[in-house]
Each structure stands twice: as C-alpha cells, then as structure tokens.
Amino acid sequence: MASVFAYAPAPESRAIVDIAPSYGLFIDGEFVEAADGKVFKTVSPSTEEVLSEIAQAGSEDVDRAVKAARRAFEKWSALPGSERAKYLFRIARIIQERSRELAVLETLDNGKPIKETRDADLPLVAAHFFYYAGWADKLDHAGFGANPRPLGVAGQVIPWNFPLLMLAWKIAPALATGNTVVLKPAETTPLSALFFADICRQAGLPKGVVNILPGYGDTGAALVAHPDVNKVAFTGSTAVGKEIARTVAGTRKKVTLELGGKGANIVFDDAPIDQAVEGIVNGIFFNQGQVCCAGSRLLVQESIQDELLDSLKRRLSTLRLGDPLDKNTDIGAINSEEQLTRITSLVEQGEAEGAERWSPACELPESGYWFAPTLFTNVTQAHRIARDEIFGPVLSVLTFRTPDEAVAKANNTPYGLSAGIWTEKGSRILAVANKLRAGVVWSNTFNKFDPTSPFGGYKESGFGREGGRHGLEAYLDV
Amino acid sequence: MPSSALTAAHPLKDVTASDSALRRFLHGLPGVDAVGLEGRAASLGTRSIKTTAKAYAIDLAISMVDLTTLEGADTPGKVRALGAKAVKPDPTDRTTPSTAAVCVYPDMVAVAKEAVAGSGVKVASVATAFPAGRAPLTVKLADVREAVAAGADEIDMVIDRGAFLAGRYLKVYDEITAVKEACGTSARLKVIFETGELSTYDNIRRASWLGMLAGADFIKTSTGKVAVNATPANTLLMLEAVRDFRAQTGIQVGVKPAGGIRTSKDAVKFLVLVNETAGEDWLDNHWFRFGASSLLNDLLMQRQKLATGRYSGPDYVTVD
C-alpha cells in the first residue's frame, strides 16, 4: 500500500450493537434454553474474542420447534396473501431501519469487511424481503396454476459465509408462500439469525412461524431427518448436501440444495482489461473468496496473459487487509480456524503440485484468522487447486487459445454454479454463455445479485433455484 | 512540419506514421465497460479518509489547485488578487501551502507572472482559442507563442473535438505536436479533451493516448465551460491511461480534472483515485492538478476546522 497517502483508521463504531452475553433458541416466539442445557461460544474471527454464548439445539429442541411451526402453519397458511405480505414488508422495513446495527453485528461475527455487510449484504437482505412480500398476494399469477398451496414446515440449514443474506433467501420465499420455518444457522455465525428472531417479534409475526435453532451439524441432521418437516432447503458444502440427499431419499420431502462451486471467469483478448481486473478481484476476493459462486478459476486467453496478470498483480497490491470494522478494509478475516486450516492445506498442495504461488506484500494481523490474497499461475486442469473448491482468497490462473477450448475447460469441473465472460464482442457473450453449464453466467461483471434473478447450480453444485419467480416453486406444492 | 514528440527510438513511434496506423492503434486499445468503470469510481468514493490522512489530503489538494479566473470581465486587479491568494491562500495561517498555479487568459499572463513572482507558483494560460478551439492553427499557435513569450509556465490547450469525432486523429495529433513545439522547452503543455463532448469512455481513452503520443505533459478532462466536466469516472479512466502509458514508454504524464469539483470531500475522493489507480508517483502537483476555483475556499475552511475544531464560515476565507 502507498506509504505517502496512508489512510488513517476509520473504524465503524461497535457501540451501535448490543450483544447479550448469552442467547437461547428461538422457538414458538420465545427465547428458550436448550433441553439438555448445552451451549457453545461464538467468536469474532478477526480477534478471536468470544462474542456470546449460544444455546445449542438438540433433537428434542428440533422436535419442539417443528411442532411449534406445525401449529403455526395452520393459521399462517390460511391468511390471505396480502396479510402475509404486510408482515414481510414490515420485516423488510425493520431490517432497513436496523441495517447499520446488523451490518456491524455481521462483521463482528463473520469477519467480513463492514464495507461488504453495509453495501452488499444488508441492502440485499432487505430487498429479498421486499421482493417476496410483493409476491405473497400474487401467487395465483406466478405461473404455477390457480391457488398453489404451501408445503408445510420448511427445515432450512444455512452456511456461515452470508449468514443474514442466506437467511433472507430461505425465509422470505417460505413465508410469502405460506410455509412456516425452522432454520439452523451455522455454528460460527448464529448471531444475526438470533437478531432476526428479535425482528420477527418486533414485526409482530405470529408465534411459531419462524423458529431459529443454532447448533452444529448434528442439529441440522436432526432437522433434516425430522418426519414432520415437509421441505428441506440447504446451502453449504457438497459433502453435506450429498448426505442430506441420502437422508431425504424415499421420503415425501421436497428438497433444494445449493452447494459448492469452482466458477470459471473467462477473459477473452478483446475484454475491457481494467474492468475485467476489477471483476476478477470481485469474483474471488469478495468475502475473502468464501463464496460458493466465486470465480476461483481464471481462464485467460493466452495472448493477453502477461498483460492481464501484470494488471491483476498491481491491483492486488492495493487491496487493504485488516480490521473488518474499518470502513477502508477490502479483505477481512477468514471465518474460522478450521476454515483457515483447510485453505492453508489446499494451497500447500497447490505449491507441491508445481503451481506458482504469488501474494502481494501484505502484513497479517497477529490475532484472528487471516489469509493473504493468493494467486496461482502455471495451473493446469490436472491440479487439485483447479478442481477442488478452496473457499478462500485463492485464485487459480489457467489459459486457453480458442473460445471452444475456454468452454471445454470451464465446463470440465464437477461443479456448475457460476461463470463469467469478459469480452467487448456481444455475439461472443451470447454464444459462449449458451454453452456454459452453470446456473449463473455473468458477462462483463461478476458476483452481482438481485432478488428477481434465480440462483442455483448444475451437477454437484446442487439443484433447485432460489430467488426470482423460480424461487417460489421450491416452497409450493406444484 | 511539426516535429513529433516521440523520438525515433520510441516504441510507439510507428503508430503515428499515418492516419490509418494511428486509427488502428487507438481503436486497438482495450475497450471500456461503462458500468464497471463507474462502479469502480463509486466504490473508491466510499473510502473513509479521517484525521491525519484527511489533513494530509487537504494540504496536498491545496498545493494541487490551479486557481483560475477565465472571465471576459477579468481585469489586472482581479488577476493580481488571485495571484496573491495563490501564494498565500490563508493569510491567517502561514503553514497553508501555496496553490500550484494561477490560470488566466493569455493577455493576463504578464500581470499574473508579476503577482506570483518569486513564490514558486506557476502561471498557466489557456491558449489555442479556448474554450471552443475553433480557430485556424496559425491563430492558435500565435495565441500560444504570445502566452509563452509573456512568461507562461504552462499552456492549457483544447483539442479540435470536431476533428476527433470525425475520426481525423492525425489532424488532432499534428495540432498538438505543433502546439507542443510552440511551447518550446520552457512551458509544459496540458491538453484538454472536453470529455463531455467526446461522449463515450472509449473516446476518452483514445483521446488520452492520442494526447500522450503527441507529447502532452498533462492530460486534462475539460474546460469547465460545458455541462459535463470532470467526473470520478473519466478521471479514473485517464489515470489508467497515464499509468499504462508510462508502463509502455517510460514517460510519465500528469492528469488534471477540471470543472465541477467544489468540495474538499470531492477533492479527497479524486486523490484516492490517484492513489489507488496511478499510484503515489502521481501524488504531487507536478503530476496532478485540480482545475477548480471555488474548491480552494472549501479546502481552506476544512483546514481551519481541522486546526481549530470548529467550522468558521465563508467570511473567514478571502473571496478571491
């Protein structure tokens, strides 16, 4: 970073958020202890400070929550859509009003920069509730026939990378369509979901419509397996997704899975180079690369490889890593020690396999979990770093010579969640996008989200769509 | 025949050999995606510059101001007052840096020169039939020679936008090289593109390279006399151009956004663009300028606020 114009710290105040020393489970409109009294701690990844002690839901709690949701379902599903919309609009507005508080909270619990929670996560969270609130009284016109029925109780398990946004993606369409919800947030990031429980109370949402059960994988497994859950929605790793698919196979539960990815970001020689560099940075270093649709494989046309890599390296040298609460921080902390270990091990394998590793000069804070933005060149399709999802700030650079080769390499992955195309030639965008097996294809941009746009994967990236009109289908009996 | 600014050994010498070669080169530059460019400029605009960094930025910005008066009604008295302010922008605080230059019409150069004598403040003059640029080349060159003879340290020339938009790039190139020659060795040349009239970002990138190939010491967004002047996006684009030009040729060129930058907050955002795009090599008034007259007073008021902890008000800074 430039030494002449060193930006003084500009930390967002954490006084705006009041974190209690302990939180219970949110069942039937009340915060309650876990039946077996178990608790776990949630820490701030950037400092390792313990933020709060959280009740850990066991199978008995899962049963209580599902029963509460079942009771609430009768009344909630019978409400006219316009009434459910009122609650959702109210929730959306409260989220907007409390957005600064929630942004700080999310940054503390997750480790991502305040810039991202403030400018990306929270506006999208509110937008999802607004969007699905708008659908609640128009389901007859959504293209699923007249008067489509809700499924019942939705068991939802969400990851730690976008805690509140994933909650919004799951809860907003579920409630709009008349379902009730039992949601398990990730064990490393339960706080914003518990604050959301408080927002539900503030909005006067009927008891039992939303239930929040913090816990580990076994809590999620118990929820997925519960016989009275009608719909399972999961976002997370492919390994866990496969386990869930096995659990629900043969039952009448509907299921949607949104799993891992190894997105290809294809840069053609006529691309707008400066904007492509920004898109590459945004594609892989947004949220420290802990994004399932990250553009973690850069496919660059051989003729511009040197020019593009020079630009990219220069750009990476301006990234600011550090205190996530500082408004000028671009790269925050890795979410957990466990995740950091996984990233470190995959990167070491990349080096061992002969790929060339590069990082900008970058000082890492002493406490907390940190990983410098990393670039691998001389990567081939045969390298593990080109195949496995790393889920960290690590970009693998591969090259291609022709559009066909780019498409072949982009599709040569077990995953299929996202892809990017960079070219100034409009016909090439259309031609290549049609051949890519990926749920989202961005052209001349990356990692842009909107509630009106469906999102989901091909192959091992899962099935089902969230967002948009398509997102309603997963919660309706159609 | 004007001599080219590029020496025979220059790596880009051949691209100006003919109109078609120049066109091929300019149209072969990487395209600009407008959404992405504006998005990047906006995201750099959210940098939060506080305390010591802010104090540094304000002083730096003051030292980069080209204090300008370009009115038909300009008088020697007005220009002398401007010169005095450029040398000592805040009479109540002698630690305030001088501005980079005063910028006047050619007939006022001698007056301005006298007003800033011995201070290090440069005198810039808008020659070449500013702001329309619609005059024969002989008139433009005469304009420049008069200004240089009167002692101008810097010449701000406008390009022929009509020729540029008609695709007659070599004509624009030849005019710039001719003006550069008229500047001689004593005056630095700032080339104004009037980016608002060039209309597309692709055109702005091409104009930037055209100006640099022709020997511009500075590339400048606009005259300040049209509806769209300096914006964060067009300045970011020009910063990318000077950065890439230096990487290819080793020649460093300055950047000057002009018009529409009125507040300290805006100025700081531009400095962030410089810092994170072209880099710290451009963070001084030899390589970056603000063409803005009302900006200076806001910078001074912010400076007083940092020094005293209180806002003063418009009566605590001089009107000119």
Image (tube, grey):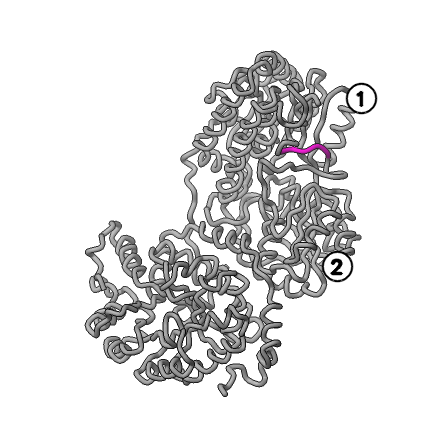
Q: Quadrant of residue A230?
A: top right
Residue plotted at (64% across, 62% down): A308
Q: Position of residue A100 (x, y in %)?
A: 44, 36
Instruction: State the extent of the magenta-drawn residues as a range.
Output: A463-467
Is the C terminus of chain B in the top left, top right, bottom left or bottom right quadrant? bottom left
| Circle number at residue A142 | none
- Crowd rating for badge 1 (residues with CA inside 10 Å; few <14, some 14–19, many 20+): few
Q: Residue furthest bottom?
A: B1
**Relative depth, front residue between A242 and A406:** A406
Residue plotted at (45% across, 70% down): B219
Question: Are the numbered discs 1 and 2 placed on the same chain, yes or no?
Answer: yes
Q: Position of residue A43 (x, y in %)?
A: 55, 35
Q: Check contact, mark 1 vs mark 2: CB within 8 A.
A: no
State left or right for residue A211 relative to residue B96. Answer: right
State left or right for residue A3 relative to residue A302. Answer: left
Q: Position of residue A312 (x, y in %)?
A: 61, 59
**Relative depth, front residue between B159 and A278:** B159
Whether A69 is drawn above or below A357: the answer is: above
The kind of secondary structure element at disc 2 is strand
* Location of mark 2 (residue): A400
- Crowd rating for badge 2 (residues with CA inside 10 Å; few <14, some 14–19, many 20+): many
Disc 2: host chain: A
* Location of mark 1 (residue): A250
Residue plotted at (48% across, 81% down): B177
